[in-house]
Image: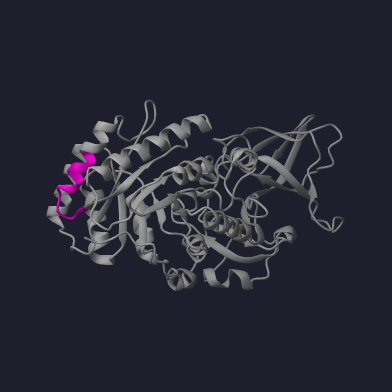
Amino acid sequence: MASTSISPLPRLALEPLRAAVLDRSTKGLPPGTEGLTLAAVGEQGWHVLAGDLPLPLAVIRKSVLEANSRWMKAFTALNGLEISPHGKTTMAPQLFDLQVADGAWAITVATVQQLDVCRRFGVRRVILANQPIGRQAVDACFSAIRENGIELYCLADSLTGVSLLAEGAARLPPSSTHPLHILVEIGFEGGRTGTRTREEALLVARAVGEVPGLQLAGFECFEGLQPTPAGADRLIDEVIAVAQEADDAGLFAAGRAMVLSAGGSSLFDRVGERLNAAAFARPVVKVLRSGCYLTHDSLSYAAAFRRILHDTSLALPEGGLEPALEVWAYVQSRPEQGRTMLTVGKRDISYDSGMPVPLRWYRPDGSMAAPQPMPAGHTVLALNDQHCHLGTPLDSPIAIGDMVAFGIGHPCTTFDKWAFLALVDDDYRVIDGIRTFF
């Protein structure tokens, strides 16, 4: 049986992506753009503040993005952890490649479409953090390990789920050197998927070991829905306890490292602290699946990170995580006192974790050298499909034609609204484009 690998991943094969011609109708590009490859975006001389691209526009500040990636690399190294960032956050192979360059152990996905994006661009180790259901999904897993040689991990939380995987293994038998690695999922009452009792988890683990082509790799959970750090601790401790019983029962192959993993971006300190406190006779690969750290946000994850900085006993690198993703819009109308309308809405920016935050404003008439912090009292009241209702103080300086940068909450649901995002320098010059695959 194959052993769990901790070898570095190779960089992704991005040349075909960089050479691809962008669709002229892509949101964020100047209307009528013809024959532009992704690789040539940074050669256009575009400047966001000069109005060279239409607004709304999603931008990523390169310096902040790279600093966030370096911070997580240092954090995991200091604390004996691996990172398998959730690719569903960005669905951007260029950003996967940055994470791989900074030592990502794997890329995590949620669906077989996302798995196919990884296969297409050469990600060699993938966690499918779901139990595959349906023939198409199951066969996609076995095709990946047969045709691409990917080291693939997926979840199981029931005997029925294992039976479906067993049927897939019979249809598309993997080689002995490339089994489908299974992580048994531990859940909690009122949560999402996952076994609800220790006994059930061990039954699933035993069943995995009886199926040719499957290999028990370890146990995992998603603690992100827990309302408190203490709740996350209890769930992660249950993963540890089940894993210890499975190890004591001889359910793992001899000489094989065991994978223990948990997921959310808001409680990753609890994952590290609880996994580091556990002791096992065999080697353990401790995997975080946080994804939102790369661009961070201005709302929920920012608040969660402040808690981590205050509470954690883990070693922390210098610096910290900062928001790298912004959405820019024009002031379109000031139709009444106390309300200003801007050209951004639900189709452009996340709102499921709180309304966007106006961060900066800029008047593109040459009177301002750089964007200025948004004065106090400006608050998003509501979003329509294409409009933002901004609560505006009577003495607000903003006027029709001004530009406003919004900070976002929950990067996942801003990224999925954009097939193209502009990568900018600190002066908002466009230096590259980021392509997504939702």
Could you tell me which residue is drawn at 59 percent across and 50 percent down? 315
Q: Nearer the viewer, residue 401 or 409?
A: 409
| Left or right, 398 with reference to 265 | right
> How many badges with numbers are in the image?
0
Could you tell me which residue is drawn at 33 percent across and 50 percent down? 281
Figure quadrant of residue 243: top left
Q: Position of residue 299 (x, y in %)?
A: 63, 39
Figure quadrant of residue 307: top right
Q: Nearer the viewer, residue 241 or 427?
A: 241
Q: Nearer the viewer, residue 108 or 117?
A: 108
Q: Position of residue 71 (x, y in %)?
A: 60, 56
Could you tell me which residue is drawn at 80 percent across and 36 percent down? 376
Residue extent of the magenta highlight: 204-214
Q: Position of residue 170 (x, y in %)?
A: 12, 53
Residue 80, visible in the rendered structure: yes
Residue 179, placed above or below residue 56: below
Q: Nearer the viewer, residue 122 or 219?
A: 219
| Left or right, 377 with reference to 71 | right
Q: Position of residue 291 (x, y in %)?
A: 50, 50
Farthest left residue in view = 170
| Left or right, 318 with reference to 39 | right
